[in-house]
Amino acid sequence: MRDGIGNFLWKLSVALYLIANGALALFVKKGLALGRSSDFEIIFKRLGFNGDTLKICVIIAGVIAFVGGIAVLLEMFDISVSFRDTLLLIIAIIWAVYVIVGIVSWVMDGFDNFWPVLQRLAVHTMVLGSLMIASGKFSR
């Protein structure tokens, strides 16, 4: 923990979030995990994907997230993974598109459900910011 407890917890949370979302995307059938699906299924559905295209995109994003989460964990133990930044950047791009689509649809709906939507937007923006920082492409 040479970077401090805050940095440790931030990296751990990013890693666990990616691993959990990857696992949900890859291993959980609809209806399991108390009806919880991966955020990637929600994101790609919101972007208009369905059927086999939806499944393929969710699986690809799930694999990238799972491996990216493992890479972040390994980095915490000073084990370098050369493609970590690229994996996290791909997930960050997917998340950015989702946030943008969410904002546009919120504006188009006339800011309906202001507080709940603002809360979800804030959470997804925090995830996006964490992914961008963790990717190393936007940290400085």
Image (tube, rainbow, N blue to C red):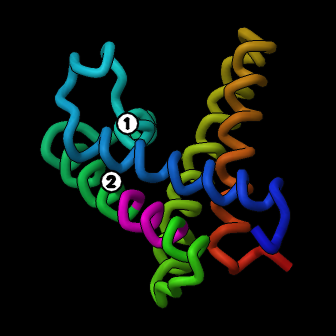
Residues 50 and 90: in front is 90
Q: Give the image location of residue 27, x and y in percent.
A: 20, 41
- Circles 1 and 2, Cβ within 8 Å, touching? The answer is yes
Furthest-left residue in view?
Answer: 52
Q: In this view, does 91 lie to the left or right of 61?
A: right
Q: In this view, does 35 lie to the left or right of 99?
A: left
Asked whether 71 falls inside the magenta stretch, the response is yes
- Residue type, mark 2 in image: Gly
Element class at badge 2: helix
- The residue at the point 66 percent across, 40 percent down is 124
- 136 to 6, vertically: above or below: below
**Magenta region:** 65-72
- The residue at the point 50 percent across, 78 percent down is 84
Q: Name the residue under label 1.
A: 38
Q: Give the image location of residue 120, x and y in percent.
A: 68, 26
- Residue type, mark 1 in image: Ser
Sequence-first tag of 1 and 2: 1
Report how far apart the C-alphas of labels 1 and 2 lie in the structure: 8 Å
Q: Residues within 10 Å of mark 1 (few under 14, many from 20)?
A: many
- The residue at the point 72 percent across, 59 percent down is 8
- 17 to 74, vertically: above or below: above
Q: Mark 2 points at which residue?
A: 62
Residue 123 badge: none
Q: How crowded is mark 2: few (under 14 residues within 10 Å), some or many (20 or more)?
A: many
| On-image quarter of the C terminus | bottom right
- The residue at the point 47 percent across, 61 percent down is 69
- 100 to 36, vertically: above or below: below
- 32 to 50, vertically: above or below: above
Asked whether 102 falls inside the magenta stretch, the response is no
